[in-house]
Each structure stands twice: as structure tokens, then as C-alpha cells.
Amino acid sequence: MPQIAQSFNIKFPLAVVWRMLADVERVVTCMPGAALTQPPEGGKIAGEMWVKLGPIVAAFAGEGELAMNDATYTGTIRGQGMDRKNNSRVRAEVEFKASDEGAATRVDIAVDFSLTGTLAQFSRGALVEEIARRLGAEFARNLEARLAAAGAPVPAGQPAEAKTGEALNAGALAFAMIRDWIKGFFARLFGRREGGS
């Protein structure tokens, strides 16, 4: 299966970040395009992920299992989902670790995934890695914003506010990646010319 590894820092202490990561109903609202379809129970989670790739909009519905180790600040998520409209399936295993960085927390994530069906053509190469990197950065920003807001806790048994916003626009992320690459290319090109003149 393809593998993706990335890290990001959250500007809050480890204990605070870990509590948030353990609150599935709240943390899922930080992931663009994701929502729970029912409250988690005993580590079991059920949800949906909307992804837009140009004219294609996929809605993966599936189930997973979350396990967290409070002693080592590590966890795993294993799950699978299916988009019936495009006949695509995804299976993934996510391992994550939170580390104390003083006033901040470092989160390391490793993802093994497989994608079959119509959307499998988008699961290869640098494109998916860059989309994952940008998605991780957006998740980190949303998580920090939620922690900074320090809103009232969600009552037991009641789902957090439903995230019914826009799908994850992978096409827009890919376009932004290409735009940044082109800008960087010309910056390097003209930088070399100026340095050589």
C-alpha cells in the first residue's frame, strides 16, 4: 500500500492536544470534508469523507476503529470506506504519535492506504503526497483554532456540531501545488540568472 508520513506542530501543551485528539466528535470537525454519521462507541467510529476532484465528487462512507495509548501518547486508526457512485473503495491504517515540544506539541503521522476503483488513478505519485501535506496543515490550523476558542465541552452522548460544509477540494489543492511549483521554478530560474550576471 502507498505510504505517507508527515509531521506538524500544534501550539498547545501535550496534555491539552492529547485530550482533544481523544475527543473524536470534536476533532473530526477539524478535518476538511469529514463528518461522523453516528456517535462513536467503544472505539468504533462511522463517518463520511467528501472529496472533489474536478467534476467528480466522491462521498466515502465507512467504518473504523480508534485505539489510543495514554501512556505512550500513540494511537492507531484502521478503517475502510466506499463511494458507491464512483465504485471506489479506500482502506487505510493511520499511526500517530504526540510528543512534548515544551509549549507546543509535535504530531507525527504515518498513513498506509489503498484506493481501488475509478479514483485509483489519483492515488499515485507526488500529487497525493502534496494533497496530504496541505490537508495535514489545514487540519493543524483548524485544531489550533478549536483549542484557542476553548468552547464549552460537548455533552456526553451528543455529537459535536455536524460538519456539513464543502467537500475536500483535491482539485483546488492540486492546482495550488502546481501554481506554487511554477512560481518556485521561475524564482529559482531568475535567481540563478541574477547571481550569474
Image (cartoon, rainbow, N blue to C red):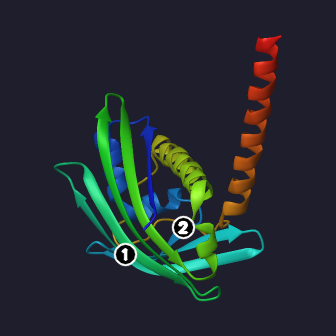
- In the rendered image, the quadrant that contains the N terminus is bottom left
Q: Is residue 154 visible?
A: no
154 over 5 or under it: above or below: below
Badge 2 crowding class, 10 Å Cα cut-off, few under 14, some 14 to 19, many 20 or more, is many
The numbered mark, 2 or 1, whose residue comes first in the sequence reads 2
Q: Nearer the viewer, residue 150 or 56?
A: 56
Q: Nearer the viewer, residue 57 or 6?
A: 6
CB atoms at circles 2 and 1 under 8 Å apart?
no
Q: Is residue 30 left or right of residue 104?
A: right
Circle 2 SS class: strand
Circle 1 SS class: strand
- In the rendered image, the quadrant that contains the C terminus is top right
Identify the residue at horizontal 46%, vertical 65% (top origin): 160
Identify the residue at horizontal 81%, vertical 19% (top origin): 193
Res. 114 mark:
none
Q: Which residue is mark 1?
A: 64
| Residue type of the residue flagged with mark 2 | Ala
* Residue 162 x %, y %: 54, 69
Badge 1 crowding class, 10 Å Cα cut-off, few under 14, some 14 to 19, many 20 or more, is some
Q: Is residue 190 left or right of residue 100?
A: right
Identify the residue at horizontal 57%, vertical 67% (top origin): 123
Total label count?
A: 2
Alpha-carbon distance for marks 2 and 1? Answer: 13 Å
* Residue 45 x %, y %: 37, 75
| Residue type of the residue flagged with mark 1 | Gly
Q: Which residue is mark 2?
A: 34
Q: Is residue 128 left or right of residue 36?
A: right
161 over 80 or under it: above or below: above
Q: Is residue 178 visible?
A: yes
In the image, farthest residue toward the front: 196
